[in-house]
Image (cartoon, helix red, strand yellow):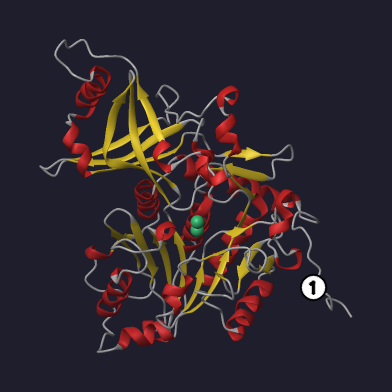
Amino acid sequence: MENLVNEKKTGWENLSEEQRKNIFKFADEYMYFLNNGKTEREIVAETKEILEKNNFVDISSKQELKPGDKVYYCNRGKSMYIAVIGEEKLECGLNIVGAHVDSPRLDLKPNPLYEESGFAYLKTHYYGGIKKYQWTTIPLSIHGVIVKTNGEKITVNIGEKEEDPIFVITDLLPHLAQEQMEKKLKEGISGEALNLLVGSIPADDKDAKEKVKYNVLKLLNEKYGIIEADLLSAELEIVPAFKARTMGLDMSMVAAYGQDDKICSYTSLRGILNVEKPRKTAICILSDKEEIGSMGNTGMESHVFDTFIAELLDKTGENRPNLLDRVFCNSRMLSADVDAGYDPIYASVSEVNNSAFLGRGVGLNKYTGARGKSGASDANAEYVAEIRKMLEENDIRYQVSELGKVDVGGGGTIAYILANKGVDVIDCGIPVLSMHAPYEVTSKFDIYEAYRTYEAFLK
Ligand code: MN
Ligand code: MN
């Protein structure tokens, strides 16, 4: 009997010349997107621009909504909800794809600048799950905003242009690292050692106490018109300064910072751009703060998304008391977040039959969680079957997997937050190697299949 055994094969075999071309072209566009935005604020700004070029408008500019209308809501410049209004009433349910735009990084502390032994440094507090040793001795850039008390907002981006300086966190030379090398990997570099080296020239001013720090402040004042206290009301993020690049002799992969989860953000954005007058209203979520638990008013735990859907209900003229809960109970969602790719060098943490492989298509996680599925949103079998049907009908390659061996670790996404509202949700994303590292690796084949998946789902 054909198909009796679920054969798991790479998607690269038997592709037509045309399919290959589409995959590579899409990956180039994805890398271009990555190189224009590395932080949640930059990605939201870039996305807004793309949306407006594609006839989406800010929802506040619309008094009423009708099928085919395309709107977005931008939450404090850090997260975003995008909608294409469907033919059916919202009450019949939404098709939602939800990704996140924040990535692990180093944030500057509120009082970051100090001088020691002739060097000026910026102190950081890491954001999200990082392996600290990976952030030393690589080129880093500074991105973000400084807001002055008069409301003026200064956008900062240093280290991306060829002519810009970059920054580095130093590490100990091996010759003197005997003691450091005996430590556990997680203790090798401490959080308080992640200090960014930013200057070494003293100011000419005779009276200045810390002349190197003073010189840095003078430079910042000349460039941005700020004083040291303005750093108190800033959000400055330290991210790798390298560009997204094609990887491998066969050009099959992408290496880049922040692919978790800009890879699903981009593919779902591209998916919704192709949606015209769907049957059910199509929604894309680009959320913030996923990497630190989705809390706060730009995170998915906030009620801002509910408010957005309530606004859709108001403006389509269908709202009535308690309708929102019903909308959610009738809705379906793909939680578009990356998946741990099977890495043969670290095979011991994975169970090979239930791992996601690079190049085998989009990866579904029925559940996540840790230690006995704790904290997981476990997709219902009926819903998994529905999604399988959609994927198979569209000839999209997919794999269903778990995040590593039982009891080895675990993780989560925004899936449970929507599932708790009553939405049917399954995690559906792209397998990644070296997740959360400054340079993550993905397969171009999977990127294209994810794009096709989100497009088909939203349509
Ligand atoms: Mn993620
Ligand atoms: Mn993550």
Residue at the location (39% across, 31% down)? Answer: 196
User: Is 159 placed above or below 336 here?
Assistant: above
Residue for badge 1: 6
Residue at the location (50% across, 61% down)? Answer: 268
Decide which of 64, 95 is in the foreground and name it: 95
Q: Residue furthest right?
A: 1
Secondary structure beneath label 1: loop
Find residue 202 and report its image quarter.
Answer: top left
Decide which of 67, 352 is in the foreground and name it: 352
User: Is 48 placed above or below 353 here?
Assistant: above
User: Is 312 placed above or below 260 here?
Assistant: below
- How many numbered circles are shown? 1
Residue 157 appears in the picture as rendered: yes
Q: Residue furthest left?
A: 150
Q: Is mark 1 within 8 Å of ligand 1?
A: no
Q: Quadrant of the N terminus?
A: bottom right
- The image shows residue 113 at horizontal and vertical percentages of 28, 31
Decide which of 360, 391 is in the foreground and name it: 360
User: Is 433 placed above or below 7 here?
Assistant: above
- The image shows residue 428 at horizontal and vertical percentages of 57, 67
Residue 29 appears in the picture as rendered: no
- The image shows residue 127 at horizontal and vertical percentages of 40, 50
Find residue 175 and report its image quarter.
Answer: top right
The kind of residue on which mark 1 rests is: Asn
Decide which of 97, 275 is in the foreground and name it: 97
Residue at the location (83% across, 76% down)? Answer: 3
Residue neighbourhood size for the residue with mark 1, other residues' Cα within 10 Å, grouped as few (<14), some (14–19), many (≥20): few
Find residue 427 and report its image quarter.
Answer: bottom right
